[in-house]
Image (spheres, helix red, strand yellow):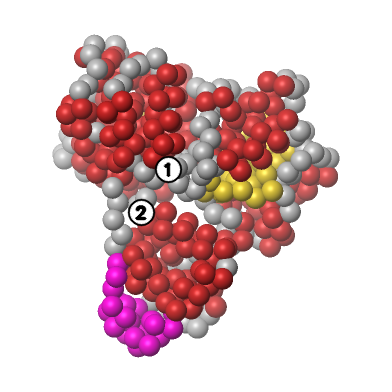
Amino acid sequence: MTKDELWQAVLAQIQFNISPANFGTWFKNTGILLKKEKGVIVSVPNNFSKEWLENKYNKTILNILRGLDGEIKDIKYKVVHSGLKTKPAENNLDEINQLEFPEFKINKETNLNPRYIFENFIVGSFNELSHAAATAVSKSPGIIYNPLFIYGGVGLGKTHLLQAIGNEIIKNSPRKKVKYLSSEKFTSEVVTAIKNHSMESLKSLYREIDVLIIDDIQFLAGKEKTQEEFFHTFNALYNKDKQIVLSSDRPPASIPSMEERLRSRFEGGMITDISLPEFETRLAILKIKTQEKKIKISEEILEYISSHIKRNIRELEGALNRLIVYQKLNNQSPDIETAKTLLKNIILHSVKVANSKKIIQSVSDFYDLKEKELFSISRRKEIIRPRQIAMYLFREELKSSFPFIGRKFNGKDHTTVIHACNKISKEIKNDEKVEEEINLIKQRIYSI
């Protein structure tokens, strides 16, 4: 396997676990610059990408590389400007790149991907309200549903819907200034402006925008300076009737470490969610994708994929891309047995089971806590409730006994666990927001 093929294999796995916005922001223009005996040097376009990959994705990248090449033990990152970038892989690999990574075909001015439009967005019961709100906003930006806040789990179509709004507005009003970016990208711009003493220029730039679309807004949590700047940007645009569209993996009320003044702004507009698609919708999505890519895949194979990949639309497309690559390289369509072999790893990846580690990780991440805090003796409200929810999930998802759960949580008495489980059960029945919160945490558990 060449270094280019090795890196494409790494990217193919990473794209299943992060949003297209983050994938495009941090992995665009990256590659393996040099493959040594026991390590690789990865080229990145700038220092921000270098720092982000080192701090946030290094472990993930290293684990994937080790799975592909057991001799690799180390990764280093080097900033390489685009003009000096190594040549991409030749022949069929270029074709594979186009199939697997359309996220990179973006408009440099707006950051929008032209493939994300309303016409190829599949509407079902799981997303119809969000689609209706997005359509209304695209027709009357700044007038109705401002801000529009769309939330839901990873890979369910939030990014597609957000970018469809931007593309539709530009199509109808070409003179409007539309800007789409991830919250991490916004944060990096704020950091750069502070470093270069150019904050006023950044403020002026964002105040001129007609439609501001920010993906994964939950990642602003805990970043005080970025939240402050976004608050002022939000107010400036809102007061001039400019449209603001936001996405998150949870509703505003459930975003930890988010300033109350920002949370109240988010809740002042239209809030809609996208849940998990049913089988018929998953199958329809695959059929639309095959038409778009002008490829023929048997109904049996499409039904097989739809039956086994249930929680992530992005994984559906990833599975389809793998079959398309096979068809392109072999000049023939795969049969069902070949498809099962080709998709074995993706199917296994999508069939997730809960365990205690995943529950603790998901609950602590959702409430922005350290895992050890769930096991502490603290009686603070912001810790007690997440701890009770974790106990409830141990009981419901793992069917653990009350004494076992008590021992797991630093020797708590089983009556404490019973009280916690009963309390959360009642809240779920009486409060839709609590039920929604628990469902979002479950989505996290089964997507890890």
Vertical side of 206 occupied by 150: above or below = below
- Residue furthest to the right in view is 240
Kindly indicate whether the residue at mark 1 contacts the one at mark 2 (C-beta within 8 angstroms).
Answer: no
Q: Nearer the viewer, residue 43 or 300?
A: 300
The image shows residue 227, relative to residue 48, as above or below, that is below
Which numbered mark, 2 or 1, is in the foreground of this view?
1
Instruction: Residue 104 in the image: state x and y as whole percent.
Output: 47, 25
Question: Does residue 122 show up?
Answer: yes
Q: Is residue 54 left or right of residue 230?
A: left
Residue 424 position (above or below residue 229): below
* Badge 1: residue crowd in 10 Å (few <14, some 14–19, many ≥20): some
Q: Where is residue 191 shown, x and y percent of the image?
A: 60, 45
In the image, 204: left or right of 310? right
Q: CA distance from mark 2 to mark 1?
A: 16 Å
Q: Please state which amino acid type lies under the numbered disc 1.
A: Glu
Residue named by callout 2: 446
**Figure quadrant of residue 87:** top left
Provide the major secondary structure of the magenta segment.
helix
Q: Quadrant of residue 113?
A: top right
Quarter of the N terminus within the rendering: top left
The residue that mark 1 highlights is 278
* Magenta-colored stretch includes residue 197: no
Specify start and end residues of the magenta stretch as a single range. 398-420
Horizontal side of residue 20 vs 60, given as left or right: right
Q: Is residue 125 depicted above or below 415 in this figure? A: above
- What residue is rendered at 53% in x and 72% in y? 427
Kind of residue at badge 2? Tyr
Quadrant for residue 434, please give it: bottom right
Determine if the magenta segment contains residue 413.
yes
Identified at 28% across, 15% down, the residue is: 328
Residue occupying the point 38% across, 88% down: 415
